[in-house]
Image (cartoon, rainbow, N blue to C red):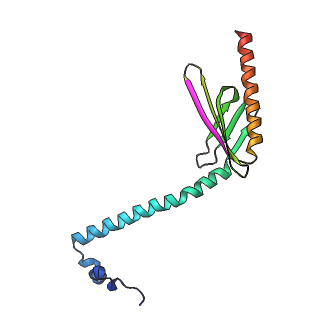
């Protein structure tokens, strides 16, 4: 036999013990040891699953930039949709990687009796600089149109 618990001095008595012969202390120890191992195994498996979940979410996400709105269809399990009107965008940020991909983030806020704030981001966008230029042009155009309409109506 290659491996036996009887070869480990501390576990020799446990290996020879019949479960019917276990007293209360041994039973409590076995239950606590088993539950602790199960909890740590579940936590470890969850930690291993996080990169897979992020990858799956990123590959299923869809980003849409129209003349009026920026829309993000989140590819996660919840299938969340987030959007904001370009005229309400207060901040647009872009981060670029060496290979030309990058992320674009929008922050929009507006007041209609309540203060609203929406954050949304487009992740892992190829040729992010051209998309950033397009997004900035659209945001500037929509904000200029909004300023003109408020001046004319005011």
Q: Residue at x 40, y 64 (%)?
A: 38
Task: Tell me what residue is drawn at x 61 percent, y 42 percent.
Answer: 80
Please indicate, yes or no, whether residue 67 appears anywhere in the rendered image.
no
Q: Main secondary structure of the magenta part?
A: strand
Question: From the viewer's perspective, is 114 left or right of 13?
Answer: right
The image quarter containing residue 129 is top right
Q: Position of residue 77 (x, y in %)?
A: 59, 49
**Quadrant in the rendering for residue 121:** top right
Is 77 situated left or right of 13 in this image? Answer: right
Q: Residue at x 74, y 27 (%)?
A: 140
Is the residue 91 above or below the residue 29 in the image?
A: above
- Highlighted range, magenta: 115-123
Rendered view: 36 above or below 137: below
Q: Compare residues 28 and 147 and report the one nearer the observer.
A: 147
Q: Looking at the rendering, in which quadrant would you find the C terminus?
A: top right
Q: State which quadrant residue 90 falls in.
A: top right
């Amino acid at each position: 036999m290659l491996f036996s618990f009887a070869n480990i001095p501390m576990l020799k008595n446990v290996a020879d013990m019949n479960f019917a012969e276990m007293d209360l202390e041994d039973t409590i120890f076995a239950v606590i040891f088993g539950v602790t191992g199960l909890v740590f195994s579940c936590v470890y498996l969850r930690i291993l699953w996080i990169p897979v979940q992020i990858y799956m979410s990123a590959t299923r996400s869809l980003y849409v930039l129209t003349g009026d709105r920026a829309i993000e269809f989140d590819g996660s399990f919840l299938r969340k949709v987030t959007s904001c009107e370009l005229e309400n965008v207060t901040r647009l940020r872009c981060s670029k990687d060496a290979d030309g991909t990058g992320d674009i983030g929008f922050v929009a806020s507006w007041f209609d009796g309540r203060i609203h704030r929406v954050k949304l981001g487009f992740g892992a966008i190829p040729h992010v600089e051209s998309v950033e230029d397009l997004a900035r042009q659209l945001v500037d155009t929509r904000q200029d149109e909004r300023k003109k309409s408020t001046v004319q109506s005011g």
